[in-house]
C-alpha cells in the first residue's frame, strides 16, 4: 500500500516537472522570437521580376510591360534599378484578368478545377521517420500555388513542423480547438472546418495548423468504435474526407502532412472493428 502511494506521488512529481519544463521552453521560444523579430512580424514571400512572372503565368513579357504602361491590371512596385516586381497575389490577379479576357485559353492562365472535376487530396506519407515528409509537403504546396492552384495544407502531425514553417508557432499561435481535431472530434465542441482554416503568407495556400491536440482524435476514435457510436460523419479517415468535402469548392488540391510512423501505426490499429 505504501509502495503504491510512493509510486503515485513519484509519477505526479514527474508529470509536474515535465509540465513546468514545457512551460519554460515555450516561454523561451516566445522570448527568442520577440527578440529576433519586431512585434506582429509575419513571414513574407519575395516579389517576382517580370521575366519570372511571365514564366509562371504564361503571359508574355511584352504583354506585361504593355499592361503596366497602360495602367491596366495590378500596379507593380519598382526596384532601385527601375525593374518591375510583382507579388504572388498580383500574379494571381493577372491570371484572373487574362482568363476573363481570353475565355478560350482560360486553362492556360487559371488552372482551377472545372465543374465535375474531383478535389485532389494528396497525402505525404512514409513509414520511416526523418524522410522529409514535411519538407516535401511544404515545397509541394509552394510549387502548386506558384502554378496558380488553390491549395489547402493540413497539418496532421502533432509535432506541427509544417505549421511552424508557415509561421504559426504551435504552442503560441495555435489555441485550443484550432486544429483539424476541432472539425473531426465527436463531442459538442466540434467546429465547422472553415473556422479552423487560416490564411498564410503564401498567396493561394491556406492552412489548417496542428499541435499536440491533434493526438486527441486518435485516442477518441477507438473509444467511439468500441461503443459503435461514430456520430455524423463516420470515423477516422472517412470523417477526414467528409469534412474536407465541405470546402471542396474553394480548393483545387489538398496536401496532407501525415504524422510519424508510430502515430500512423496506432491510427491504423484504431480502425479495426471491436470484437
Image (cartoon, grey):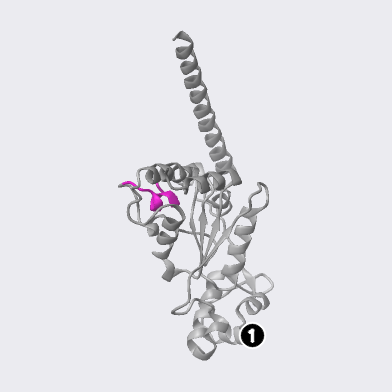
Please tell me whether residue 241 is drawn above or below residue 260 in the rendered image: below
Please tell me whether residue 136 is drawn above or below residue 95 in the rendered image: above
Point out residue 169 in the picture as x, y percentages from the top left corner. Answer: 53, 46
- The stretch in magenta equals 177-187
Point out residue 252 in the picture as x, y percentages from the top left corner. Answer: 50, 70
Indicate left or right for 73 with 232 as reference: right
Residue situated in front as seen by the camera: 222 or 198: 222
Q: Residue at x 54, y 28 (%)?
A: 21
Image quarter of the N terminus = top left
Using a 10 Å C-alpha cutoff, classify the residue at mark 1 as few (fewer than 14 neighbours), some (14 to 19) or many (20 or more). some
Q: Is residue 25 magenta?
A: no
Point out residue 208 in the picture as x, y percentages from the top left corner. Answer: 47, 55
Residue lying furthest left: 188
Q: Is residue 182 magenta?
A: yes
The image quadrant of residue 124 is bottom right
Point out residue 238 in the picture as x, y percentages from the top left corner. Answer: 43, 58
Residue lying furthest front: 275
Image quarter of the C terminus = top left
User: In the rendered image, which residue does mark 1 sit on?
Assistant: 60
Amino acid at each position: 500500500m505504501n509502495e503504491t502511494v510512493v509510486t503515485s506521488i513519484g509519477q505526479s512529481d514527474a508529470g509536474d516537472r515535465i509540465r513546468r519544463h514545457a512551460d519554460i521552453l515555450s516561454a523561451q521560444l516566445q522570448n527568442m522570437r520577440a527578440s529576433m523579430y519586431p512585434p506582429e512580424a509575419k513571414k513574407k514571400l519575395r516579389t517576382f521580376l517580370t521575366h519570372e512572372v511571365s514564366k509562371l503565368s504564361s503571359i508574355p513579357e511584352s504583354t506585361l510591360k504593355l499592361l503596366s504602361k497602360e495602367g491596366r491590371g495590378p500596379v507593380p512596385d519598382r526596384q532601385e534599378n527601375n525593374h518591375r516586381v510583382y507579388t504572388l497575389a498580383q500574379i494571381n490577379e493577372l491570371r484572373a484578368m487574362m482568363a476573363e479576357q481570353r475565355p478560350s485559353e482560360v486553362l492556360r492562365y487559371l488552372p482551377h478545377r472545372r465543374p465535375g472535376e474531383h478535389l485532389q487530396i494528396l497525402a505525404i506519407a512514409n513509414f520511416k521517420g526523418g524522410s522529409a515528409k514535411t519538407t516535401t509537403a511544404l515545397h509541394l504546396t509552394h510549387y502548386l500555388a506558384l502554378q496558380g492552384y488553390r491549395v489547402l495544407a493540413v497539418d496532421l502531425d502533432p509535432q506541427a513542423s509544417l505549421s511552424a514553417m508557415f509561421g504559426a508557432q504551435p504552442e503560441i499561435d495555435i489555441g485550443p480547438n484550432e486544429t483539424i481535431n476541432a472539425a473531426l472530434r465527436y463531442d459538442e465542441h466540434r467546429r465547422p472546418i472553415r473556422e479552423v482554416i487560416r490564411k498564410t503568407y503564401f498567396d493561394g495556400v491556406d492552412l489548417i495548423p496542428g499541435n499536440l491536440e491533434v493526438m486527441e482524435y486518435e485516442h477518441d476514435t477507438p473509444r467511439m468504435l468500441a461503443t459503435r457510436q461514430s456520430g455524423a460523419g463516420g470515423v477516422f479517415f472517412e470523417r477526414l474526407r467528409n469534412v474536407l468535402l465541405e470546402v471542396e469548392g474553394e480548393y483545387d488540391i489538398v496536401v496532407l502532412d501525415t504524422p510519424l510512423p508510430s502515430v500512423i501505426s496506432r491510427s491504423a490499429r484504431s480502425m479495426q472493428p471491436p470484437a
